[in-house]
Image (tube, rainbow, N blue to C red):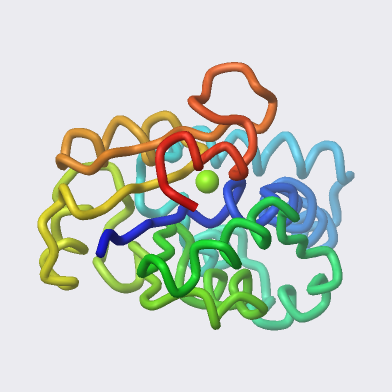
Amino acid sequence: MKVISFDVDGTVVDGKFMDRFWNELIPKYYSKKHGIDYSEALEFVKRCYDEVGDKDLRWYLPDYWFKRFQLDIELKDILEEFKDELKIYPDALEVLEKLKGRYKLIAVSNAVREIMDFELSELSEFFWRTFSCPSDIGDIRREPEVYLKICRILNLHPSKIIHIGDHPYFDFEVPTKAGIKSILIDRRGENGHIRSLREIEKFIDL
Ligand SMILES: [Mg+2]
């Protein structure tokens, strides 16, 4: 039996939720805390994100940013407040439902465990295992080694896994280097192999 691996943000769960978390809520809290305009706070916060860059583990750690920006907030409170805005893509639900029982499904994310569990809270019945790479592996998926570690934990050869995700580097380039067959989804229909998860039947028997 093959294992099918799903990225979370932008693949199963609408990426707008986390986008809003980083690019709207954090600047909003920053603006409040430091008494500056929202637009100024937004510009400053984004500049700090860019300085660190998304290939750096710290970029993914809310606690790092809360500390750096001196924000007295708790991740769980923010998630709780905005939980109604979390949306699962309809095609993801449909496909998970079809794959369930026929394949073992796993979820792999660059988000910390608390965020990942929150995002998958309605979907836990579908996943055999979930991996928050920063929390469980100690790094984001910037090197094939992170995927290989997951393979070792599952006691699986990389050729037994098919990974699907929306990031050309983290979800395609890196897992491909690890020997994992990877499928890139691009919901805008520009650069991916598929535009909707419904199209994975081109690669996997549904
Ligand atoms: Mg993603």
189, above or below 197, in the image: above
Residue depicted at x 43% and y 29%: 168
In the image, what residue occupies the spot 53% across and 70% down? 116
Q: Quadrant of residue 33?
A: bottom right
Work out whether 153 lies above or below 186.
below
The image quadrant of residue 125 is: bottom right
Position in image of residue 161 (x %, y %): 26, 53
Residue at (62% x, 43% y) in the render: 198
In the image, residue 115 sits, relative to residue 187, either above or below, namely: below
Q: Percent position (x, y) of residue 106?
A: 39, 66
- The N terminus lies in which quarter of the figure? bottom left
Q: Is residue 118 left or right of residue 38?
A: left
Q: Is residue 183 visible?
A: yes
Point out the residue furthest to the front here.
205
Considering every residue shown, the one lying at the far right of the view is 37
Which x, y percent locates residue 146? 21, 54
Q: Quadrant of residue 154?
A: bottom left
In the image, what residue occupies the spot 44% across and 40% down?
54
Q: Is residue 131 left or right of residue 144?
A: right
Q: Nearer the viewer, residue 81 or 8?
A: 8
On screen, residue 136 versus residue 155, left or right, reads right
Residue 152, position in %: x, y?
11, 66
Do we see residue 146 in this rendering?
Answer: no
Front residue (pair 95, 70): 95
